[in-house]
Amino acid sequence: MTSSSLDDLRRDIDRVDEVLVRLLNERARCVCEVGRLKKEKGIEVYQPDREKQVLAHRAGIGGGGTARSRSGARGCFERIIDEARRLERRVVH
């Protein structure tokens, strides 16, 4: 691999990261709205069945990949869900 192709790939990764950050910010905005609604309706923040549903849905749209990449993607979404729960708790409490 030449250094220019390495540089090109790194720029590609940077562009993907920029999109990911924008999408995560949008997701966080939605999560805060969910938290406000849960507070209004007296619904608990932690909804284990919903979290299982979210993870199952993400696994279904994973597009295949190796077991290792699926495991990594699941771990990322588990972390995203943990952060979402933390944001909801801040809104609710």
Image (cartoon, helix red, strand yellow):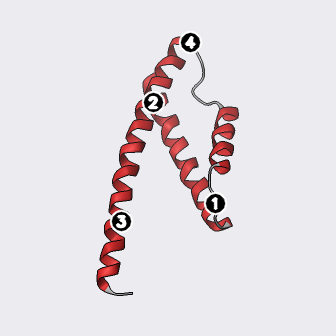
Q: State how far apart marks 3 and 4 are (Cα).
A: 43 Å
Residue 4: x %, y % from top left: 29, 81
Q: Which residue is mark 1?
A: 70
Depth check, front residue: 55 or 86: 55
In the picture shown, does residue 17 fall above or below 22? below
- Is 21 positioned to the left or the right of 62 in the image? left
How dense is the environment of label 1, judged by Cα within 10 Å: few (below 14), some, or many (20 and up)?
Answer: some
- Is 85 positioned to the left or the right of 32 in the image? right
Q: Which residue is mark 3?
A: 12
> In the rendered picture of this protein, how many numbered marks are placed on residues?
4
- Is 31 positioned to the left or the right of 74 in the image? left
Q: State how far apart marks 1 and 4 are (Cα).
A: 35 Å
Residue 40: x %, y % from top left: 51, 12
Looking at the image, is mark 2 or mark 3 nearer the viewer?
Answer: 3
Residue 43: x %, y % from top left: 60, 18
- Residue 93 at least partly seen: no
Q: Upstream in the sequence, badge 3 or badge 4?
A: 3
Residue 30 tag number? 2
Residue 15: x %, y % from top left: 33, 59
Q: Upstream in the sequence, badge 2 or badge 1?
A: 2
Residue 41 tag number? 4
